């Protein structure tokens, strides 16, 4: 730090505390500190030491202040002000309550949402020297791939730089079934675990703390070493009842005994959702399959050398990766890049990042609206007190005293709002988390973030103080006579402050149009999702998934046998009408969909970038029947589609249309060319199905070159919880392509939940060690998948409603204020013959002007906001006249009602009374 | 216990340490911090307090010297005769703290008790 000069922060601290020193002694004080700071710097002290040193200036300044006696007077005066402020505010409960609530809403919402975002996106993990921890990911910007894993050769090359990294390792997440054995505390049904298989050096890089036992060491990583496992705190607590003798016990993962060597402390695991860690037993060199440059599957964690900046490391690693991928690599990897990112709890995809950004914006708007509203309320309130302040000023209160008094009122309001907002934030976060999928948020240690809270309170403090300051300076005023005159004339504050208040109301209205439009769009898209026809009857379906361990089911025949027996056994259960299995289920049910590219027999592989890709789903016999789907053309599968029989494939409607138009295809519907789907509406079954592809043979190009005959076309089935409108899919009989991980689908007679105990018992008879994962009605899977959307929708809805309340109270306040200030004027008008209707019209007109202006500006803003939101709308057009129309109508109506109350009050003004009061 | 010349409140240990450092010829805040191991937040107010009670006095370093060394002049403190008397009294009071053997090791290490 020497030679770089004194850290700016230290200078600031000294400058700031210097203002506390009594003026008489300030010069000596300042020179003394300046000299010693310079001396410290010249002596080569580090920045941190210099800053700590400078902190001593505060006690020094406070000492001098106390000695001088200024301290007590100031504090006593301030406390006096506070006391008086609290009393003054209690005397106006309506105003105070409204202001405090407004602030609390803004502070609470902002704190809850930003705390959540911070915990997920920005907070380093609670590991030692966590700011040194990074992850390295592969990207392919040209293809829009971000956050791919890294291949082993890349890992070796990129982390070889020991000037950048102290150490590096990698992991891969995997699933294993933990057997229901163990006795003691570890009993229970087998359960699917998410664990990480980790390379050597993984724990040395992360340095997590253990609660029990030890971490994995070099010896555990040797090929053929006894199988060991480290457990997460959560697993240890939930499954093993926090057994203190856990270390040394054996648990079976996929039937293989593993010795538990350690338990991590809570929150110490990477990735955060892993429940256990097992060593990748590569020995000295990885096996050939793991060592391919194109195999981008490893999640790399790396610890930077102390003092190395993430951005610097990123720049260097990018350059290295670029040079690797400009060399001899597989064609499809060309253009690959790598990047270094700080290690965080969650790796957030680009679209989630955008969602957070939009949400952050919305929250900020709510806070801004709240602050504006508070300012408006304060200004209204203070100008109502103009007369009192003028009087006090005339009686000899100094301008400083009056400003101090008004500021302390603002301060009390902001503080009360902040306190209430904190309570709101705590409650709000609990509510928010309830909407989120528990497996994704459950492990996060989410608390109200102090810094965020301080920021929100600070902002509202600033808003109240500014709002208090402007009128305070005016009121405490240049001209006492002016203030007294204004007071008596009853015309209130001048035209300038009126314009300012009106401006605030217009801005609030505009912002709430924006937020409500956003909320309306989200709600509509959500409803559309729920109402969408999934293509089959989803009620009464029960689903679950199983993974057969490779160790015991290495032979395809055993896998076939297991599924045949399982389906046969399940179908005999009472209440189960039909059972089948598939590699992936629709509606967000369990399973994994793979995408494969296809070509017609005799056609070359499609060029890079042109993919005739489709989801590749293996299904058992009776699958379409269990779903209640009949083929549009051709047939589904039957038990005759077995291993050894002619290879067959069934495609969905969208894929059939793509195939028909593909090179070598028969052309559009019914054999004609140009069969592109038009519009969003689903064509009725049986019309325009490109049946020309029936009987043609296709192959999937990358992994499988077997030719399969297209025997049927089925309707599009909704894939996720959200519409998969137009996703191409291809189905093959599981018997011709067996797979160890499958999902079962059961059509039940009554409540699908009622069949669960029977299913457990039946499957346990077949293999007691195989866990049934996500055993639940298919509708529940869909609801879980929709949970995230519901969360966002709930947020926007809340923001919108809050904005509405704030805006309408703003309109009301403004008009009511204006009416009350003009009581005399209205009285005079009525005395000289104005009718009640005329007065009503005038007041309503004033409200209407504000409303129309606010709504107009709001519509423009809302259009921009909706466009920004469009990516989250699942195909719903962002320009939605109905949503926007209803928002405008709602706001206009609410504003009208808010104006009507003071307007009616105005018509009841008694001219005689009005003239007498002042 | 010796009655103190000033007859006022006894100096706390921190102040005694600062006074002690001044008596040994360490003359400004930073130097005193280094000698005593106390933080700036203790040393600077303590110096003020000592000056106020007449145990120390401060003056500005000769501007020429400072200029030659290319730095602003420092605020130098020195112990007054009153301060010396106070220090002697205080050291007498804290004599009970002086050398001690704990678990067979003499503290402070090095020098044998006189």
Image (tube, grey):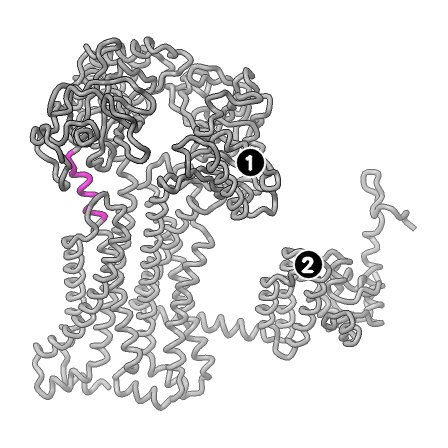
Residue at the image point whose x is 32% and y is 61% from the top: A101
- x, y percentage for residue B79? 81, 69
Rendered image quadrant of residue A174: top left
In this rendering, position of residue A192 left or right of residue A618: right
Q: Quadrant of residue A368?
A: bottom left
Which disc, if any, is residue A2? 2
Q: Chain of mark 1?
A: A
Q: Quadrant of residue A95 in the image?
A: bottom left
Residue A357 drawn above or below residue A553? below
**Which quadrant holds the N terminus of chain A?**
bottom right
Q: Is residue A304 found inside the magenta-colored segment of the image?
A: no
The vertical placement of A61 against A178, above or below, is below
Q: Which residue is mark 1?
A: A159
Instruction: Give the image location of residue A639, x and y in percent.
Output: 19, 11
Residue A525 belongs to the span the image colors magenta: yes
Whether residue A54 sits left or right of residue A527 in the image: it is right
Callout 1 crowding tier (Cα within 10 Å): few <14, some 14–19, many ≥20 = many
Residue range highlighted in magenta? A522-533
**Residues under numbered marks 1 and 2 in contact, where contact means CB atoms less than 8 Å apart:** no
Percent x, y of residue A524 = 19, 47
In the displayed structure, A533 sits above or below A833; it is: above
Q: Is residue B96 left or right of residue A744?
A: right
């Amino acid at each position: 730090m020497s030679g770089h000069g004194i850290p700016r922060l230290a200078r600031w601290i000294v400058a700031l505390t210097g203002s506390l020193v009594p003026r008489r002694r300030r010069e000596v004080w300042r020179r003394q500190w300046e000299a010693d700071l310079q001396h410290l710097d010249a002596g080569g002290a580090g920045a941190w030491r210099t800053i700590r040193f400078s902190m001593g200036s505060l006690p020094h300044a406070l000492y001098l202040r106390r000695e001088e006696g200024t301290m007590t007077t100031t504090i006593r005066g301030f406390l006096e002000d506070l006391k008086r402020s609290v009393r003054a505010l209690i005397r106006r409960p309506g105003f105070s309550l409204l202001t405090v609530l407004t602030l609390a809403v803004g502070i609470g919402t902002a704190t809850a949402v930003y705390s959540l975002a911070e915990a997920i996106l920005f907070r380093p993990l609670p590991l030692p020297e966590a700011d040194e921890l990074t992850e390295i990911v592969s990207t392919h910007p040209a293809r829009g791939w971000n956050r791919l894993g890294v291949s082993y050769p890349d890992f070796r090359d990129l982390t070889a730089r020991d000037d950048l990294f102290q150490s590096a390792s990698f992991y891969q997440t995997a699933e294993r079934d933990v057997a229901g054995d163990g006795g003691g505390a570890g009993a229970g049904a087998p359960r699917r675990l998410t664990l990480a298989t980790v390379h050597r050096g993984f724990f040395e890089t992360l340095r997590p703390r253990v609660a029990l036992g030890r971490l994995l060491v070099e010896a555990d990583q040797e090929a053929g070493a006894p199988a060991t496992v480290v457990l997460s705190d959560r697993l240890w607590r939930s499954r093993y009842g926090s057994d203190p003798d856990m270390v040394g016990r054996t648990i079976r993962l996929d039937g293989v005994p593993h010795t538990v060597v350690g338990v991590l402390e809570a929150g110490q695991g990477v990735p955060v959702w892993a429940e256990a860690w097992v060593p990748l037993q590569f020995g000295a060199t990885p096996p050939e399959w793991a060592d391919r440059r194109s195999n981008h599957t490893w999640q790399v964690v790396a610890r930077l050398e102390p003092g190395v900046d993430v951005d610097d490391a990123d720049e260097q690693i990018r350059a290295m990766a670029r040079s690797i991928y400009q060399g001899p690599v597989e064609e499809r990897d060309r253009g690959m890049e790598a990047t270094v990112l700080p290690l965080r709890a969650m790796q957030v995809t680009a679209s989630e990042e955008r969602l957070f950004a939009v949400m952050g914006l919305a929250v900020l708007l709510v806070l801004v609206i709240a602050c504006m509203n508070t300012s408006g309320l304060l200004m209204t309130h203070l100008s109502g007190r103009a007369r009192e302040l003028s009087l006090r000023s005339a009686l000899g209160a100094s301008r400083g005293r009056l400003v101090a008094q008004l500021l302390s009122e603002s301060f009390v309001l902001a503080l009360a709002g902040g306190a209430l907002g904190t309570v709101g934030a705590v409650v709000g976060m609990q509510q928010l988390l309830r909407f989120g999928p528990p497996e994704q948020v459950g492990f996060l240690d989410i608390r109200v973030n102090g810094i965020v809270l301080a920021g929100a309170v600070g902002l509202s403090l600033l808003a109240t103080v500014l709002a208090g300051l402007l009128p305070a300076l005016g009121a405490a005023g240049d001209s006492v006579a002016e203030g007294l005159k204004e007071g008596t004339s009853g015309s209130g504050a001048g035209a300038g402050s009126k314009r300012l208040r009106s401006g605030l109301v217009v801005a609030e209205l505009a912002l709430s149009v924006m937020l409500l439009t956003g909320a309306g769009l989200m709600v509509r898209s959500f409803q559309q999702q729920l109402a969408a026809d999934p293509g089959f009857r989803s009620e009464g379906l029960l689903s679950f998934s199983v993974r057969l361990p490779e160790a015991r089911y290495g032979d395809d025949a055993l896998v076939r046998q297991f599924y045949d027996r399982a389906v046969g056994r399940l179908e005999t259960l009472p209440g189960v009408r039909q059972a089948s299995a598939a590699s992936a289920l629709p509606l967000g049910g369990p399973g994994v969909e793979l995408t494969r590219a296809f070509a017609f027999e005799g056609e070359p592989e499609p060029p890079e970038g042109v993919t005739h890709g489709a989801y590749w789903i293996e299904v058992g016999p009776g699958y379409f029947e269990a779903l209640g789907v009949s083929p549009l053309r051709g047939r589904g599968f039957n038990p005759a589609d077995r291993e050894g029989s002619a290879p067959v494939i069934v495609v969905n409607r969208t894929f059939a249309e793509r195939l028909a138009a593909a090179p070598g295809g028969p052309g559009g519907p019914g054999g004609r060319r140009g069969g592109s789907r038009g519009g969003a509406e689903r064509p009725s079954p049986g019309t325009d199905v490109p049946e020309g592809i029936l009987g043609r043979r296709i192959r999937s190009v990358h992994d499988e070159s077997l030719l399969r005959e297209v025997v049927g076309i089925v309707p599009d089935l909704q894939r996720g919880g959200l519409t998969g409108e137009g996703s191409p899919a291809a189905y093959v009989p599981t018997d011709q392509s067996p797979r160890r991980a499958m999902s079962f689908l059961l059509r039940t007679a009554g409540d699908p939940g009622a069949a669960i105990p029977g299913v457990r018992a039946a499957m346990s008879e077949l293999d007691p060690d195989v866990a049934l994962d996500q055993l639940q009605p298919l509708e529940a899977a869909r609801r879980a998948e929709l949970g995230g959307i519901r969360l966002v929708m709930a947020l926007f809805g809340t923001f919108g409603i809050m904005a509405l309340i704030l805006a309408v109270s703003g309109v009301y306040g403004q008009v009511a204020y204006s009416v009350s200030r003009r009581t005399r004027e209205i009285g005079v008008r009525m005395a000289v013959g104005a009718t009640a209707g005329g007065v009503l019209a005038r007041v309503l007109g004033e409200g209407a002007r504000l409303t129309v202006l606010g709504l107009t500006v709001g519509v423009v803003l809302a259009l921009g906001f909706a466009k920004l939101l469009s990516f989250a709308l699942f195909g719903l057009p962002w320009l939605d006249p109905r949503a926007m129309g209803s928002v405008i109508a709602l706001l206009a109506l609410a504003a009208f009602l808010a104006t009507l109350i003071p307007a009616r009050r105005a018509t009841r003004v008694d001219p005689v009374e009005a003239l007498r009061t002042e | 216990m010796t009655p103190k010349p000033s007859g006022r409140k006894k100096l706390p240990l921190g102040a005694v340490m600062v006074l002690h450092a001044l008596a040994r010829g360490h003359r400004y805040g930073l130097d005193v911090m280094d000698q005593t191991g106390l933080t700036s937040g203790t040393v600077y107010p303590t110096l003020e307090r000592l000056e106020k009670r007449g145990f120390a006095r401060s003056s500005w370093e000769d501007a020429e010297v400072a200029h030659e060394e290319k730095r602003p002049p420092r605020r130098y403190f020195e112990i007054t005769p009153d301060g010396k008397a106070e220090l002697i009294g205080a050291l007498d009071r804290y004599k009970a703290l002086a050398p001690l053997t704990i678990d067979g090791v003499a503290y402070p290490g090095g020098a044998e008790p006189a």
